[in-house]
Image (cartoon, grey):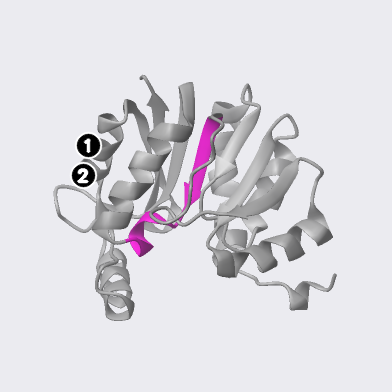
Amino acid sequence: MNIHNKPYSESCDQNREPILAVIAPILRHRSSLLEIGSGTGQHAVYFAGHLPQIRWQTSDMAESLTGIRMWLDDSNPGNVLDPFELDVCQSDWPRQTYDAIFTANTLHIMGDDEIRCFFTGLGQVVGPGADVLIYGPFNYQGQYSSDSNRQFDQWLKSRDRRSGIKNFEDVCALAEQQGIGLVQDYAMPANNRILHLRSDA
């Protein structure tokens, strides 16, 4: 399938190598991963291609599923599973558990109610000792970490007033309510972070 027919995110191409450098060592002994908010599907194809031992389950809102399937039809390394619909507040979460969770650039497009749904759902699908990896921008003690993040937050709120960059402390507190604790907070390019959490940490 021609790449021009598929949805494309330039930022996925720009951030995939730095993200992989962080997550690959963490995931090397993992076998089942749920990606929440797979977007275009580019991350799934790239990361799963470098992590062949993982069955990488894609998911997203209904309107994104066709685009993800286009990427899988064209570039599936063989270990990426067909996406299912997952609206964090409206959908039934999977009944199975996973030993890893990955999500990129999702929390800042959610409202506070959706964030609570996200972590409640997460508590249902993480197996014992599962690794949870969350990529994106965060505020610390209510403060922006850069001018570019401040501008990005203003842009997000102009599109949807419920959205916006979330506070690191609030995210960690919601995770801890589900028995998921912070392991490490990685600084990433372009003022992003990767939060590495683990269930029953």
Callout 1 secondary element? helix
- The answer to whether 55 appears left or right of 136 in the picture is right
**Residue 69 drawn above or below residue 101:** below
Q: Are marks 1 and 2 in contact (CB under 8 Å)?
A: yes
Instruction: Name which residue type carries label 1.
Output: Ala
Q: Nearer the viewer, residue 54 or 144?
A: 54
Q: How many marks?
A: 2
Q: Quadrant of the N terminus?
A: bottom right
Residue 180: % across, % down? 34, 28
**Residue 53 drawn above or below residue 170:** above
Residue 39: % across, % down? 57, 61
In three-dimensional space, the C-alpha distance between marks 1 and 2, rounded to whole angstroms, equals 5 Å
Span shown in magenta: 99-110
- The answer to whether 125 appears left or right of 141 in the picture is right
Disc on res. 173:
1
The residue beneath circle 2 is 170
**Does residue 98 appear anywhere in the picture?**
yes
Instruction: Name which residue type carries label 2.
Output: Asp
Residue 171 part of the magenta segment: no
Residue 25: % across, % down? 58, 28
Q: Nearer the viewer, residue 6 or 195?
A: 6
Q: Quadrant of the C terminus?
A: top left
Callout 2 secondary element? helix
Q: Residue at x 65, y 53 (%)?
A: 83
